[in-house]
């Protein structure tokens, strides 16, 4: 295997510690916690005792059952060693993130951990910052989908590999290389493959078993997920009537894990639902979990969004927990973080900052009593997730389910549900909030193209405005090209903080192609203009959707979108944004269109805490 590049901050066998030659300070401290403390619904501290002698630390704790454990020292360490019942289970040759963090699933037993401070200053005392019982934290890794890497990059491991190690312990590998997957597993984390549920629903249980068997014996995989069943309908096209028979056919001598995806998990008093949940929790071999999908599109108001979250998570997804006592540790809620406009996105209301919305969803799981003791939490959608939201999603997982926080992370960054920077970014009813400068009479107008939003932008869900207009992408501002001049619409961006980064997104397309269902992807030439005296442009990129077909359709007869992205830093609290066809090469009379004009605070990589 060729040598794998490693992050500068990663330690273990991959990095040498800074070793001090100064004489240690002979100081003894003993600190004992008599009982564990619940930090939030899914995270608890572990009762432990420490003995400190200068830069040396010994930690003792006991686990009564198999458990994911997160341990973090106050400073980087060397000579790390862990014993269970007197036998070494981990040592310096095991991977420590940043020479400081350890995360593994440990069997029951009495543990002793020893380490020495790697700080050159002998006066720096080594202590324990965290020793937590944590849940399984699932993440669907990034992938190159539909050409979006032109905006988001394709060096996924270099971008977020360290975050994957510090924030998750169970991964669907997606586009990660075998070497990157091995590095993840070497750190004690787990990798699952995904297999389709269709053969079960089609009563072809032997086909299902063969599909699973083809990968289950591969060393790289610790188990698999079955994707996916319709919880409300045992006998439908995604039914699970034969699932027990199918799992029994799988030969699993290593007792690898069998996890099951289901959507629409809301108990509706069908006995088959109870039997299915019990089967998923206790499969014929290995360890099982039922993983429910809760993918939530943004809503127009914060109050509506919070009510929607509570209904879908605390009422619907948690309803099965009220019927089967003790199921929670075998059950997981997986949220969606996909916002890859125009391929697949839950971010449907342009005035909303989806980062805050995702935060409130995880906050609900961490705090609402209905979600107590869940065994798994995580995100699906890393393969359809813009680079900014990828970082934010992983930081949320770290914040709530590794460190055990209960307060919203958004408050630390000043994020809010509706930042109030732009209005009417989807042109739902008219062109209000925008100043309009047509090239000629009536060359700028508001219009709608039925079903265009679903086909061209694949917006998730059914969000509507207060007066019932869907945020589905059908409504647009239309610009008719003119030989006599340019079309301009403009709006003042407000409530900006000078010096802070922001990101502008908008979608452009051909109105004529949308109406006539013509597939002719190109740069339509609608560009944003921002005065450099008012803001500094840090990045400007364009994605042209050239996919052969829609994600959910086999046909190609629909128009294609441009997604524009601009990252800028304002120099004042108000900055004028102009959208114009000045650079368009389209012929006069051609009708172009724009919608989903969005500006929100940008979560830059250097903002990571």
Image (tube, grey):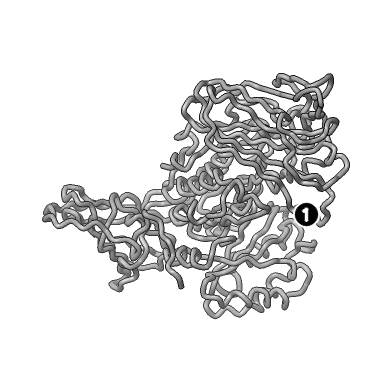
Using the rendered view, name the quadrant where residue 247 is placed: bottom right
Image vertical order of residue 124 relative to residue 571, above or below: below
Give the total number of marks visible in the rendering. Answer: 1
**Position in image of residue 338 (x %, y %):** 63, 48
Q: Residue at x 52, y 21 (%)?
A: 573
Using the rendered view, name the quadrant where residue 211 is placed: bottom right
**Position in image of residue 499 (x %, y %):** 46, 28
Work out whether residue 311 can be spotted: no
Pick the residue in front: 26 or 329: 26
Image vertical order of residue 96 relative to residue 349, above or below: below
**Position in image of residue 213 (x %, y %):** 63, 77
Question: Looking at this rendering, what residue extends furthest in the right direction?
Answer: 516
Q: Residue at x 48, y 30 (%)?
A: 500
Work out whether residue 238 can be spotted: yes
Helix, strand or loop at disc 1? loop
Residue 441 placement, left or right of 78 = right
Q: Residue at x 65, y 60 (%)?
A: 261
Image vertical order of residue 385 relative to residue 5, above or below: above
| Quarter of the rendering occupied by the C terminus | top left
User: Where is mark 1, residue-wise?
Assistant: 549
Pick the residue in front: 118 or 188: 118
Question: How busy is the neighbourhood of tag 1: few (under 14 within 10 Å), some, or many (20 plus)?
Answer: some
Residue 83 placement, left or right of 525 = left
Pick the residue in front: 65 or 353: 353
Q: Residue at x 57, y 42 (%)?
A: 358
Residue 267 placement, left or right of 190 = right
Pick the residue in front: 428 or 65: 428
**Position in image of residue 348 (x %, y %):** 69, 38
Residue 575 placement, left or right of 26 = right
């Amino acid at each position: 295997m060729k040598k794998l590049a490693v992050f500068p901050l990663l330690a273990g066998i991959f990095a040498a510690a800074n070793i001090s030659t100064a004489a240690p300070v002979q100081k003894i401290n003993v600190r004992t916690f008599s009982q564990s403390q619940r930090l939030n619904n899914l995270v608890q501290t572990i009762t432990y005792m420490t003995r400190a002698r200068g830069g040396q630390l010994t930690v003792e704790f006991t686990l009564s059952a198999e458990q994911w454990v997160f341990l973090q020292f106050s400073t980087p360490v060397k000579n790390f060693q862990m014993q269970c019942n007197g036998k070494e289970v981990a040592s310096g040759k095991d991977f420590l993130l940043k020479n400081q963090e350890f995360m593994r699933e440990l069997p029951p037993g009495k543990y002793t951990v020893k380490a020495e401070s790697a700080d050159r200053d002998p006066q720096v005392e080594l202590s324990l910052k965290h020793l937590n019982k944590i849940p399984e934290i699932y993440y669907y890794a990034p992938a190159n989908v539909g050409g979006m890497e032109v905006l988001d990059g394709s060096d996924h491991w270099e971008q977020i590999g360290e975050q994957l190690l510090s924030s998750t312990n169970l991964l669907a590998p997606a586009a990660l290389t075998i070497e990157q997957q091995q590095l993840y597993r070497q750190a004690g984390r787990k990798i699952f493959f995904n297999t389709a549920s269709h053969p079960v629903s089609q009563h072809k249980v032997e086909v299902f078993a063969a599909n699973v068997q083809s990968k289950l014996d591969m060393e790289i995989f610790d188990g698999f997920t079955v994707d996916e069943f319709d919880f409300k309908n045992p006998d439908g096209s995604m039914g699970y009537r034969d699932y027990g028979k199918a799992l029994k056919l799988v030969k699993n001598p290593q007792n690898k894990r069998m996890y099951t995806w289901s959507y629409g998990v809301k108990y509706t008093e069908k006995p088959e639902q109870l039997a299915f949940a019990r089967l998923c929790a206790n499969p014929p071999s290995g360890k099982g979990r039922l993983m429910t999908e809760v993918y939530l599109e943004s809503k127009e108001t914060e109050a509506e969004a919070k009510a929607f979250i509570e209904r879908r998570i605390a009422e619907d997804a948690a309803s099965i927990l009220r019927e089967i006592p003790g199921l929670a540790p075998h059950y997981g809620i997986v949220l969606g973080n996909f916002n890859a406009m125009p391929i697949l996105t839950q971010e449907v209301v342009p005035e909303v900052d989806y980062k805050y919305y995702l935060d409130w969803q995880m906050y609900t799981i961490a705090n609402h009593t209905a979600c107590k003791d869940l065994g798994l939490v995580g995100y699906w959608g890393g393969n359809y997730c813009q680079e900014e939201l990828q970082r934010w999603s992983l930081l949320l997982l770290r914040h709530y389910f590794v460190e055990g926080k209960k307060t919203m992370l958004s408050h630390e960054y000043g994020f809010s549900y509706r930042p109030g920077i732009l209005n009417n970014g989807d042109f739902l009813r008219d062109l209000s909030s925008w100043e309009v400068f047509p090239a000629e009479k009536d060359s700028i107008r508001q219009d709608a193209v039925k079903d265009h939003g679903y086909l061209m932008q694949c917006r998730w869900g059914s969000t509507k405005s207060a007066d019932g207009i869907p945020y589905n992408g059908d409504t647009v501002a239309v610009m008719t090209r003119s030989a006599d001049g340019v079309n301009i619409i403009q709006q003042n961006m407000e409530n900006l903080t000078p010096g802070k980064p922001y990101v502008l997104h908008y979608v452009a397309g051909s109105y004529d192609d949308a109406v006539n269902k013509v597939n002719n992807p190109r740069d339509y030439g609608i560009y944003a203009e921002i005065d450099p005296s008012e803001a500094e442009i840090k990045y400007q990129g364009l994605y042209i959707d050239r996919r052969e077909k829609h994600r959910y359709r086999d046909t190609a007869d629909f128009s294609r979108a441009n997604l524009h992205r601009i990252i800028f830093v304002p120099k004042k609290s108000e900055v004028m944004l102009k959208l114009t066809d000045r650079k368009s090469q389209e012929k006069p009379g051609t009708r172009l269109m724009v919608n989903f004009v969005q500006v929100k605070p940008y979560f830059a990589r250097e903002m990571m805490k």
